[in-house]
Amino acid sequence: QVQLVESGGGLVQPGGSLRLSCAASGIFDINAMGWYRQPPGEQRELVAIITSGVRTNVADSVKGRFTISKDNAKNTVYLQMSSLKPEDTAVYYCNVVRRNGQNYWGQGTQVTVSS
């Protein structure tokens, strides 16, 4: 059974930090793991991805503030978010892509940056 379990979202003040986690189970031959977000009233957008070869791609809007990493033994991807801004407020979704192109999505976790 495929499961993506996300955790770590919440309410944080501007300038604060959060770490999101996404643990994948029941998925094999993973090619890439990543995070997308959907701000209120907007389309879903890429935040960061990390491939099996440990290459990363990070959106310009979060470069230098967010770091993506993974633990292969745990099939878990992390998103360390620092210097958070109100415009980072969104539902954050974990995404896993298998080598055959199959895509899986987490249920989403809310991140709200507000004073």
Image (cartoon, rainbow, N blue to C red):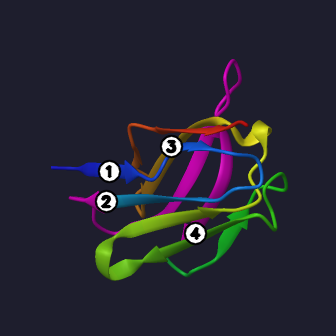
Q: Real-space Cα distance between discs 1 and 3?
A: 10 Å
Q: Amino acid at mark 2?
A: Ala
Which region shows up in magenta? 24-51
29 left or right of 109? left
* Circle 2/circle 1 CB separation < 8 Å: yes
Question: Measuring 31% from the left and 81% from the top, which residue is drawn there?
Answer: 73
Which residue is disc 3 drawn over? 93
Image quadrant where residue 38 sits: top right
Query: Where does residue 40 sit, x and y in percent of width and height?
Result: 66, 22
Q: Amino acid at mark 3?
A: Tyr
Which residue is disc 4 drawn over? 50
In front: label 4 or label 1: 1
Q: Real-space Cα distance between discs 2 and 3?
A: 13 Å
Which mark is first along the chain, 4 or 3?
A: 4
Which residue is disc 2 drawn over? 24
Which mark is first along the chain, 1 or 4?
A: 1
Question: Measuring 56% from the left and 52% from the top, which residue is drawn there?
Answer: 35
Q: Real-space Cα distance between discs 3 and 4?
A: 14 Å
Question: Measuring 77% from the left and 38% from the top, which residue is drawn there?
Answer: 86
Residue 58 located within the stretch drawn in magenta? no
* Circle 2/circle 4 CB separation < 8 Å: no
